[in-house]
Image: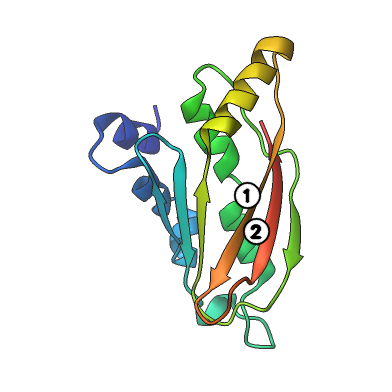
Amino acid sequence: MGLVEWFNNQKIIPFGRLLSFYPPFFLLGAKVRISEDYLKIRLRLPIRWYIKNNNGVMFGGAISMLSDPFPAIVFEKIFNNISAWTKGMQVKYLMPAKTTIEANIVISDEDIEFLENQLKETGKAEKTFNYYFLDKKTDRSLMFQIPSI
């Protein structure tokens, strides 16, 4: 059993907060919060000098790295005994991220029901989730489309 698993089993640190200490996220300065039922996820990424490109805006790769695993992570928690994967990701950059960005992701009861039905019928499921990272100065910085499970 690894250190992360041990901490998670002890319930000392909430799961989402524990993920904030995952080395790639920690080095980015990312903050992760996941509700106890795993249906609400909040991702926050501050702009740092080392994740700015030559135009003074956040590298898209840093944002992609933060957003990539979350559908798969939460579905492995919601649906026991399944292996969930991020199948692909499409990013649309709507505006450059010049300040801290944040995504609030909510998985609905309809999403869960849809996936449960697919799992029962075929033994596998796929659903695309769309969510936005919001820049504090603008409405939308970029949109992610992530097929998962």
Left or right: residue 119 versus residue 35 is right
What mark, if any, has residue 141 been given in the picture?
A: none
Above or below, 116 against 90 in this view is: above
Colour scheme of the rendered structure = rainbow
- Which structural element holds mark 1? loop
Vertical position of residue 69 compared to residue 109: above or below: below
Q: Nearer the viewer, residue 38 or 57?
A: 38
Picture quarter with the N terminus: top left
Task: Measuring from the top left, give residue 127's x and y in whole percent.
Answer: 70, 35
Q: Is residue 70 left or right of residue 33?
A: right
Q: Work out how far the residue at label 1 is from the one at label 2, CA to CA, in angstroms.
A: 6 Å
The percent coordinates of residue 132 (x first, y second) are 61, 60
* Badge 1 vs badge 2, beta-carbon distance below 8 Å: yes
Task: Name the residue type under label 2.
Answer: Ser
Identify the residue under disc 2. Answer: 64
Tally of numbered tags: 2
Element type where label 2 sits in the image: helix
Query: Which residue occupies the foreground of this view, 40 or 14?
Result: 40
CA neighbours of label 1 inside 10 A, class few (<14), some (14 to 19), many (20+): some
Q: Residue at x 64, y 72 (%)?
A: 141
Q: Residue at x 59, y 36 (%)?
A: 72
Q: Residue at x 59, y 33 (%)?
A: 111
Q: Can see residue 77? A: yes
For badge 1, the amino acid type reads: Asp
Q: Which residue is mark 1?
A: 68
Q: In the image, is 100 to the left or to the right of 127?
A: left
Residue plotted at (75% across, 64% down): 92
Q: Can residue 83 be seen from the camera position used here? A: no
Residue 55 is situated, as x and y percent measured from the top left of the image, at 69, 88
Counting other residues with Cα less than 10 Å from the Cα at mark 2, is it few (<14), some (14-19), or many (20 or more)?
some
Residue 11, compared with residue 144, is above or below; it is above
Image coordinates for residue 78, horizontal then vertical, percent: 48, 27
